[in-house]
Amino acid sequence: MFLDQQLMFSTSGTSPDTGVAFSYNASAQQSNSIDFGVARDLGAGEPMWLYFGFLAQTGTNPTIVLALQAATSVSSGTLQSPVTKWTSPTITNPAVSTSTNVPTQYVHRIDPGAPYRYWAVTYNVAVNPSTVTIVCGFVKDVEVKWHSRAVIEV
């Protein structure tokens, strides 16, 4: 599985595996978006996967829920009339990597559907105070045969 900087929702700096910290926020979800330039059905053809992993956390038993959203238009970086394509189960006390380059990994296969140009992932971190550092993006393939860490499909 290769991480492409252009397909990552959550990165810091120039490396796609460095992650971004999202903090508890009582009233808002935090998100980053990707613009594909034209509307695309990501579920058609070869499988596309949403990949995410946790690099660090603070707080006592934080929980996080991710939601993959899509839209046909955006204004000031915010999706307009987004459609939620998938919502993760609540992940409590996310397992954190002992190596910052190999987080515990989760994947979700993107289902076929209407084409969208703009995609975003929202992160809702609960339990105050807490912060979860996450790396998240689209990947083309998931190779689990050779992988030394568990890849959890959700």
Image (spheres, rainbow, N blue to C red):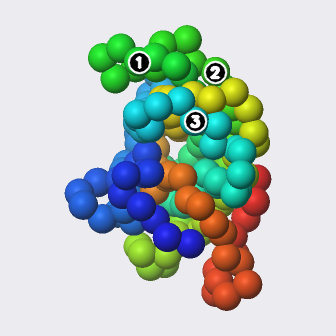
**Amino acid at the residue labelled 1:** Val
Residue 58 seen from this side: no
Residue 66 percent across, percent down from the top left? 60, 39
Mark 3 vs 2, N-terminal side: 3
Which class describes the residues within 10 Å of circle 3: few (<14), some (14-19), or many (20+)? some
Identify the residue at horizontal 43%, vertical 51% (top origin).
Answer: 8
Residue 20 percent across, percent down from the top left? 36, 51
Mark 3 vs 1, N-terminal side: 3
Quadrant of the rendered structure where residue 149 is? bottom right
**Amino acid at the residue labelled 2:** Val
Q: CA distance from mark 3 to mark 1?
A: 15 Å
Residue 80 seen from this side: yes
Callout in the foreground (3, 1): 3
Residue that numbered label 1 is attached to: 74
Residue 93 percent across, percent down from the top left? 62, 54
Between residues 59 and 2, which one lies in front from this camera angle? 2
Residue that numbered label 3 is attached to: 40
Q: Please give left or right for residue 77 compared with residue 56 in the image.
A: left
